[in-house]
Image (cartoon, rainbow, N blue to C red):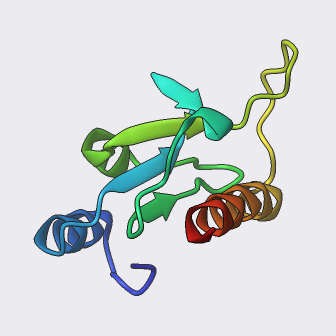
Amino acid sequence: CWWCSSNEKKKNYCKKNELPILCAHRKDAVGLYDYTFESDFCLCLGGALRGISSTITAASKQNIVVEYGRDFRNALDSASAAAVFSFEILRQKKVKAK
């Protein structure tokens, strides 16, 4: 719901439409490849400087992190994170379709 003018409206839209909010956020997260995505959801990726708002993270059903396989605490830029998440979501959808 990128068209919503505020984070509160985004949260309310998702709640009203029963769309779980998933955040690319390290705190209390599960690994990207360990999570099974629902058919419909709202994925929130933070911006490079501001991250994700506390309004959205508080409403998150699950935080998900891209695991690097070693101790590396830096975050991907937004475009790269979107690509990594998109490929995993597509992979899961292809597996379900078989």
Residue 67: x, y in percent? 75, 29
Total numbered labels placed on residues in the image: 0
Relative placement, left or right, of 77 versus 42 is right
- The residue positioned 42% from the left and 67% from the top of the image is 39
- The residue positioned 21% from the left and 74% from the top of the image is 13
Residue 47: x, y in percent? 64, 57
Task: List the single residue furthest toward the front.
Answer: 98
Relative placement, left or right, of 39 versus 91 is left
72 above or below 1? Answer: above
Would you say residue 49 is visible in this rendering?
Answer: yes
* Quarter the N terminus occupies: bottom left
Task: Looking at the picture, tell me which residue is in the foreground, 26 or 91.
Answer: 91
Which quadrant of the figure has residue 15? bottom left
Task: List the single residue furthest toward the bottom.
Answer: 3
Task: List the single residue furthest toward the top.
Answer: 71
Residue 66: x, y in percent? 71, 37
- The residue positioned 50% from the left and 58% from the top of the image is 44
- The residue positioned 77% from the left and 38% from the top of the image is 75
Would you say residue 27 is visible in this rendering?
Answer: no
53 above or below 13? Answer: above
76 above or below 37? Answer: above
* Quarter the C terminus occupies: bottom right
Task: Looking at the picture, tell me which residue is in the foreground, 34 or 81.
Answer: 34
Residue 25: x, y in percent? 54, 37
